[in-house]
Image (spheres, helix red, strand yellow):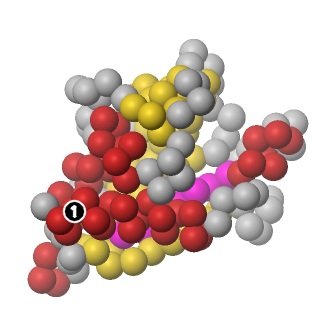
């Protein structure tokens, strides 16, 4: 396993965990906070409710991805593994952990984990290795702007 296969970024946001989680768990909202400007859109009505849910997202290049939810605790944690539409996930996942703090603030951690990507996925691994904490922080910062501004 690659020691650098899990990338994280964290910061406090002046908003309650429930409000932040609603923005994360609703795929239609994700392009608004995507700091990588990779997401184009998702149909409304796909709000994630449980492990096993699959939501469909279109990226800026027109690719359609099925996102398989692998972790879910309402208001606290969510993670999904993307795959080309109709295929099984390759082994990488995006996740969020929210820790409520005092005064309605939340410690938000964004996680990109590609530790399960097989060596045979070299093109995907090369792209995964380019993920940095700064790129994850860009999404957290946009999420903060949305939540703190409302």
Quadrant of the image for the N terminus? bottom right
Quadrant of the rendered image containing residue 92: top right
> Can you identify the residue that label 1 sits on?
147
Residue lying farthest to the bottom in this orientation? 102
Q: Tag count in the figure?
A: 1
Q: Quadrant of residue 133?
A: bottom right
The percent coordinates of residue 96 (x first, y second) are 41, 58
Residue at 39% of width from left, 43% of height from top? 31
Along the line of sight, the residue nearer the viewer: 69 or 123:
123
Asked if the stretch drawn in magenta spans residue 110, the answer is: yes
Examine the rendered structure and indicate whether residue 121 appears above or below residue 43: below
Residue drawn at (37%, 44%), measured in percent from left and top?
Answer: 30
Say few, some or many: other residues with alpha carbon within 10 Å of mark 1 (under 14 / 14 to 19 / 20 or more).
Answer: some
What secondary structure is the stretch in magenta mostly built from? strand
At 82% from the left and 40% from the top, the residue drawn is 123
In which quadrant of the rendered image does the C terminus lie? bottom left
Can residue 147 be seen from the camera position used here?
A: yes
* Residue 50 visible to the viewer: no
**Magenta region, residue range:** 108-115
**Residue 9 percent across, percent down from the top left:** 51, 71
> Could you say where residue 140 lies in the image, as x and y percent from the top left?
40, 65
Instruction: Residue 21: give x, y in percent of width and height.
Output: 26, 54
Direction from residue 94 to residue 125 in the image, left or right = right
Membership of 18 in magenta stretch = no
Residue at the image position 36 percent from the left and 62 percent from the top: 142
In the image, 131 versus 121, the foreground residue is: 131
Q: Is residue 117 above or below residue 64?
A: below
Most foreground residue, 21 or 37:
37
Query: Considering the numbered disc 1 on the image, is that residue within a helix, a strand or a loop?
Result: helix
Q: Residue furthest top?
A: 86
Q: In the displayed structure, does residue 13 sit left or right of residue 37?
A: left
């Amino acid at each position: 396993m690659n020691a650098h296969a899990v990338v994280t970024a964290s910061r406090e946001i002046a908003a309650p965990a429930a409000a932040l989680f609603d923005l994360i768990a609703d795929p239609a909202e994700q392009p608004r906070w995507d700091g990588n400007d990779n997401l184009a859109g998702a149909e409304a009505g796909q709000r994630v409710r449980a492990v096993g849910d699959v939501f469909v997202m279109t990226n800026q290049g027109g690719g359609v991805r099925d996102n398989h939810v692998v972790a879910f605790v309402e208001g606290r944690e969510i993670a999904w593994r993307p795959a080309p539409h109709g295929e099984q996930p390759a082994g990488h996942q995006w996740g969020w952990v929210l820790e409520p703090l005092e005064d309605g603030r939340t410690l938000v951690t964004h996680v990109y984990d590609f530790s399960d990507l097989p060596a045979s996925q070299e093109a995907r691994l090369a792209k995964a290795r380019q993920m940095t904490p700064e790129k994850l922080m860009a999404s957290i910062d946009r999420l903060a702007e949305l939540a703190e501004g409302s």
